[in-house]
Image (cartoon, helix red, strand yellow):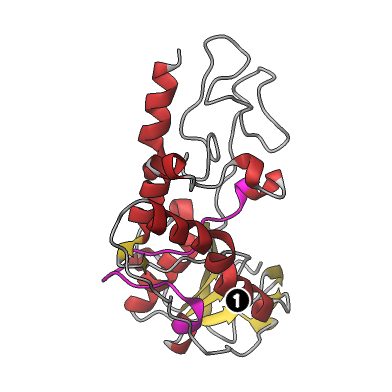
Amino acid sequence: MDPSIRSLHLHDYRRPEQLSPGGVLLVGSGQSGVQLAEELMAVGREVTLAVGRCGRFPRTYRGKDIFWWLRSLATRGPNVGTPLPAPADLANPRLRLACNPQLSGHGKRHDTNLRAMAMAGLRLAGRLESIDGTEARFAADLADTLAYADRFFDERFRRTFDAFAQRSGESLPEDEPVQVDFDPPPLTELDLARERISSVIWTSGFRPVTDWIDLPVFDDFGLPITRDGHTDVPGLSFIGTPWLVDMGSANLVGLVRDAEALVTSF
């Protein structure tokens, strides 16, 4: 990449003012990517987002915030037959490292829908394939990726949410998530200099770093092999890692639950 364009990972980003004047290319459309897009657009930056294969949730469903749903399924779901997805439910173990569904707490409570954000001025591109000098190239997969995000909730979670609503005794009126009918124009090539894009921010997530533990307790993806947090090495247990017990294990909705189960099983 041309040295005139600043490149930094989200880990090193703090506020819009630290960026040079001009547009910003964000690479990655998980929670960090869409949240940063909203923050930068709110201060008047022109933002281009290279979109990866991430699903999205409605912020509210049947009158409750999505985090109410996730916490309810994590703590009460097993008792009524509607637990959060567990590792054994995944078609491929690599999916444990997939991005979290697109959500944001920026401003007022709202859905985070890339189609709506594009209508408001966010420029969308497919997955970033290369940057050569100032020439960025993107895959021609934007339409397919947005369609995947649109159906993610219905295919992966809605049936479980509705079953919990029926079995839990909660008063949860039926709901239909809002869909946005807008197809952003395809974008496969972009001259960063011509478009006055001065910064590229990589919102591509993190990998687990476990090489400081020299024991055979990790799988091919760098995640610990455990049963309810315990490894086969006596005294070595884990907490807070992705998919330790289920989808909620690395999030606040599941961390307390997992910790209580871990300490009571010693």
Is residue 151 shown above or below 224? below
The answer to whether 151 appears left or right of 103 in the picture is: right
Q: What residue do we see at 38% from left, 44% from top?
A: 253
Q: Identify the image quadrant of the N terminus.
A: bottom right
Q: Quadrant of the rendered structure where residue 5 is?
A: bottom right
Q: Identify the image quadrant of the C terminus.
A: top left
Is residue 215 shown above or below 21? above
Is residue 71 shown above or below 219? below
Q: Quadrant of the rendered structure where residue 232 is?
A: top right
* Outermost residue, top side: 234
Q: Secondary structure at mark 1?
A: helix
- Across and down, in percent, residue 99 comes to 56, 56
Give yes or no for residue 99 being in the magenta stretch: yes
Is residue 41 shown above or below 73? below
Give yes or no for residue 28 being in the magenta stretch: no
Q: Nearer the viewer, residue 214 or 11?
A: 214
Q: What residue do we see at 48% from left, 82% from top?
A: 179
Q: Residue type at mark 1?
A: Leu
Point out the stretch of residues depicted in magenta: 96-116
Identify the residue under disc 1.
146
